[in-house]
Image: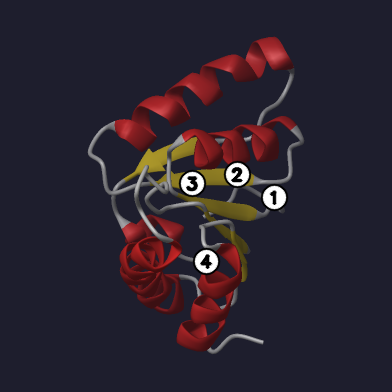
């Protein structure tokens, strides 16, 4: 849970975009951030880096890293950056198939653990992933 009245923000995907989301949210003190990824150790390491920059950059937001969706419980905002990048020779349809499965799984976890959250999708192909998340989540 967030400390005091601070909001809880979950950034799902700890790659370059997800870690940047976590850093910007922390630096702007928008809330406490939970950086989540399926790769063991990745979100924990990036969260530690962002946390250690706090005293130098002048922010007090807590940033934690996890591989467990239980830790996004109660999030006010969920930003989804997880997914595969498009590789040479990969069609938009290929990317849709792979990232569609990833987004579907993430949406199941958001619905379970953060049912009151506002959700922002950043995963490509963006238009289809946003619609898929909208359909899977059933959120307004």
Distance Cα–Cα, label 4 vs label 1: 12 Å
Q: Earlier in the sequence, mark 3 or mark 4?
A: 3
- Residue that numbered label 1 is attached to: 6
Residue occupying image coordinates x 33% and y 70%? 97
Q: Nearer the viewer, residue 26 or 61?
A: 26
Q: Earlier in the sequence, mark 4 or mark 1?
A: 1
Q: Neighbour class for label 3 at 10 Å: few (<14), some, many (≥20)?
A: many
- Residue that numbered label 3 is attached to: 34
Distance Cα–Cα, label 2 vs label 1: 7 Å
Q: Neighbour class for label 4 at 10 Å: few (<14), some, many (≥20)?
A: some
- Residue that numbered label 4 is attached to: 74
Quick one: which residue is furthest to the left in this view?
Answer: 40
Q: Nearer the viewer, residue 103 or 112?
A: 103
- Residue that numbered label 2 is attached to: 32
Q: Are marks 2 and 1 in contact (CB under 8 Å)?
A: yes
**Which secondary structure lies at badge 1?**
loop
**Which secondary structure lies at badge 3?**
strand
């Amino acid at each position: 849970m967030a400390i005091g009245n601070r909001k809880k923000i979950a950034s799902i995907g700890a790659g370059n975009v997800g870690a940047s989301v976590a850093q910007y949210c922390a630096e702007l003190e928008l809330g406490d951030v939970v950086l989540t990824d399926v790769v063991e150790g990745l979100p924990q390491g990036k969260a530690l880096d962002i946390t250690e920059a706090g005293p130098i950059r002048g922010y007090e937001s807590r940033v934690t890293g996890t591989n467990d969706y239980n830790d996004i419980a109660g999030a006010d905002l969920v930003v989804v950056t997880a997914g595969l990048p498009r590789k040479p020779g990969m069609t938009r349809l290929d990317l849709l198939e792979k990232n569609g499965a990833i987004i579907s799984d993430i949406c199941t976890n958001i619905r379970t653990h953060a049912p009151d959250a506002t959700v922002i999708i950043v995963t490509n192909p963006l238009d289809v992933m946003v619609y898929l998340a909208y359909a899977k989540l059933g959120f307004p």
